[in-house]
Image: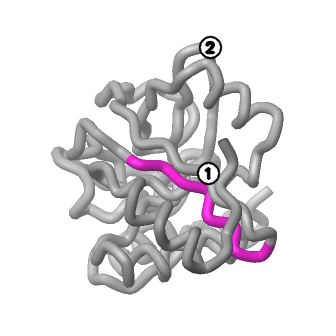
Amino acid sequence: MFPLVKKDGVTACLPLAKLNNEGIPAGCEGFLTAIAGMMLCKELTGIIPWIASINKTTNEACMFSHCTIAPCLVSDFSVKTHFETGMGTAIEGNFKSDLVTFSDLIIISAKHLLHPQTYQAGQNQPLPARTQIEVKLTEDEIKLLRQRPLGNHHLIFPGDCKELLHLTCLLLGIDILK
């Protein structure tokens, strides 16, 4: 895992966070569909969402985390090492908004999953990545994430932009899972 990082001792986390902070959608090489979603969402909302991965689900919540969050989306941030390798640099901070919309915008498979919810900030658990949020979900939403996941890379927005994304999906002919 991460052979280039281990070989050179650096990561792209901090430069990707900086690009997103400057209005240029950017993500790791494995996130191509999520990056396409970031580009669309930036055009719709003016905000570049954070790409985060699911680390854990319970019957009431889902924990998301990732090392490439734009500094404008967090408060009290600091620069740490990349979590998985202990090398390079990454952002750790507290997500600014108490209300978030998260989405799997998988353009290739024409699926979309939307959930604006509140989260519990400040988890800062030692696992699994630098910036973390826990999003409260309904039992049906947890079941959908477990049974019909659309990938592990989710777009996290501050605030509630569910209606705008829902309308966009309808106009583009993208199915919305319920």
| Cα–Cα span, label 1 and label 2 | 18 Å
According to the picture, the residue beneath numbered tag 1 turns out to be 113
Name the amino acid type tagged 2.
Answer: Asn
Residue lying at 37% horizontally and 78% vertically, measured from the top left: 44
Q: Residue 7 versus residue 142: which sits nearer the camera?
A: 142
Tell whether position 176 is magenta: no
Mark 1 vs 2, N-terminal side? 2
Closer mark to the observer between disc 1 and disc 2 = 1
Q: How crowded is mark 1: few (under 14 residues within 10 Å), some or many (20 or more)?
A: many
Which span of residues is magenta-colored?
101-108
Task: Point out residue 67 in the picture as x, y percentages from the top left corner.
Answer: 48, 54
Quarter of the figure that contains the N terminus: bottom right
According to the picture, the residue beneath numbered tag 2 turns out to be 59
Task: Tell me the colour scheme of the image.
Answer: one colour
Q: Is residue 62 left or right of residue 25?
A: right
- On screen, 121 above or below 87? above
